[in-house]
Image: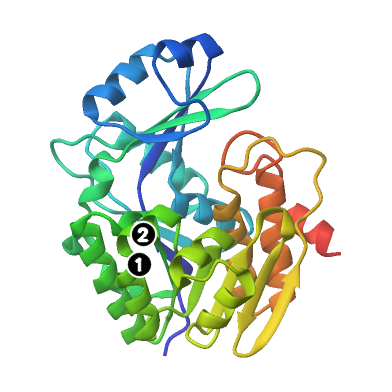
Amino acid sequence: MTDPRYDVVAIGNAIVDVMAPCEDELIEELGLAKGGMTLVDTERAQELYDAMGRATEISGGSAANTLAGMAALGAQCAFVGQVAKDQLGDIFAHDIRAVGIDFDTAPREGDPPTARCLIFVTPDGERTMNTFLGASQFLPPAALDEELIASAGVLYLEGYLWDPEEPRSAMRRAIDVSRGAGRKVAFTASESFVIERHGDDFRALIEEGKIDILFVNEHELATLTGKPDFEAGLDVLKGKVPTLVATRSAKGAVVIANGERAEVPAEPIAKVVDTTGAGDLFAAGFLTGHTRGEDLETCLRMGAICAGEIISHIGARSEKDLKALVAEKLG
């Protein structure tokens, strides 16, 4: 087996985050659920975009956020995701490449347009998100560069993208390519509602031994295993997944790998401002440590440090030098 060209290649939703400050009155006027996340169609997305004030646009999506964190830590990464041939598609491609991630998925012609998450930020720091999934839901298996997939030490898959048929087929094919090349497959469950819809698929992948590294939070663990008790949930999965990583927000995180267990507390920060992206950046820190051969506790610490940085400000991209921050805190 050749040395990997990339530390991680990820497949995920290619979404542009469009963020704009607003007053509470606009939230009410638009009939939005403050602090929530709502899926919207093309027409509603355009209506909300037109209502926004001056906005900041940055490439987003769960797996893309993880890769941005990894790239900031010095990892070599590539992203696979579907955009449309439009202005936001160009913004996504430029932005993700600008942070050092390779991105070569060909844009899709015609409708629907590139996915976007329209985020209204009120003066109290609360984010009200409206997500239009658009072109990201139409990533076909034919869009995969199988040599690229095989050249990564770890293939990282985003559970959010399991819902639509084409990307699900693409990810199944990518799993086969990655495992055929002797690489590892990492999977993030993404959200409990995703597990409620596709839990049977996820449990089958686990039973078949196709997942090497599984990321869940305590709520997702309970949904996936049917065990409300955290330790009971870990017991169900720990013998089936070589590396099981479970996060517990303020209670820290646990990893069980090949019978060995490690856990760390959450990284102390002055104030939690916005938890969006915490899980994404935790995965970034952990995977970077893992690909460098760090011990389990160090991998968890790296994840906790990255997550702590991201929840200290608005937005799912780091504002500090993550590499310097991790080096300083690990001492």
Residue at the spot x=40%, y=59% of the render?
Answer: 158
Q: Is residue 178 rendered to the left or right of residue 143? A: right
Residue at the spot x=34%, y=86% of the render?
Answer: 208
| Crowdedness near tag 2: few (<14), some (14–19) or many (≥20) residues, C-alpha within 10 Å | few
| Crowdedness near tag 1: few (<14), some (14–19) or many (≥20) residues, C-alpha within 10 Å | some
Residue 4: image tag? none
Name the image quarter holding the N terminus: bottom left
Residue at the spot x=28%, y=37% of the render?
Answer: 114
Among the 4 quarters of the image, the one containing residue 12: bottom left
Q: Which residue is nearer to you in this view: 12 or 108?
A: 12
Q: Which amino acid, mark 2?
A: Glu
Q: Where's residue 254, x and y in %?
A: 67, 71
Which residue does the numbered mark 2 point to in the structure image? Answer: 196
Name the image quarter holding the C terminus: bottom right
Dot 1: element: helix
In the picture shown, does residue 195 fall above or below 232? above
Could you give the CA–CA distance between mark 2 and mark 1, rounded to whole angstroms?
A: 6 Å
Is the residue under label 1 in contact with that under label 2 (CB below 8 Å)? yes
Q: Is residue 72 visible?
A: yes
Among the 4 quarters of the image, the one containing residue 39: top left
Q: Where's residue 327, x and y in %?
A: 79, 60
Q: Which residue is nearer to you in this view: 224 or 92?
A: 224
Which residue does the numbered mark 1 point to in the structure image? Answer: 199
Q: Is residue 6 visible?
A: no
In the picture shown, does residue 266 fall above or below 3? above
Residue at the spot x=76%, y=67% of the render?
Answer: 264
The residue lying furthest to the left in this view is 110
Q: Which amino acid, mark 1?
A: Gly
Q: Where's residue 51, x and y in %?
A: 38, 12
In the picture shown, does residue 61 fall above or below 132? below
Q: Is residue 269 rendered to the left or right of residue 282? A: right
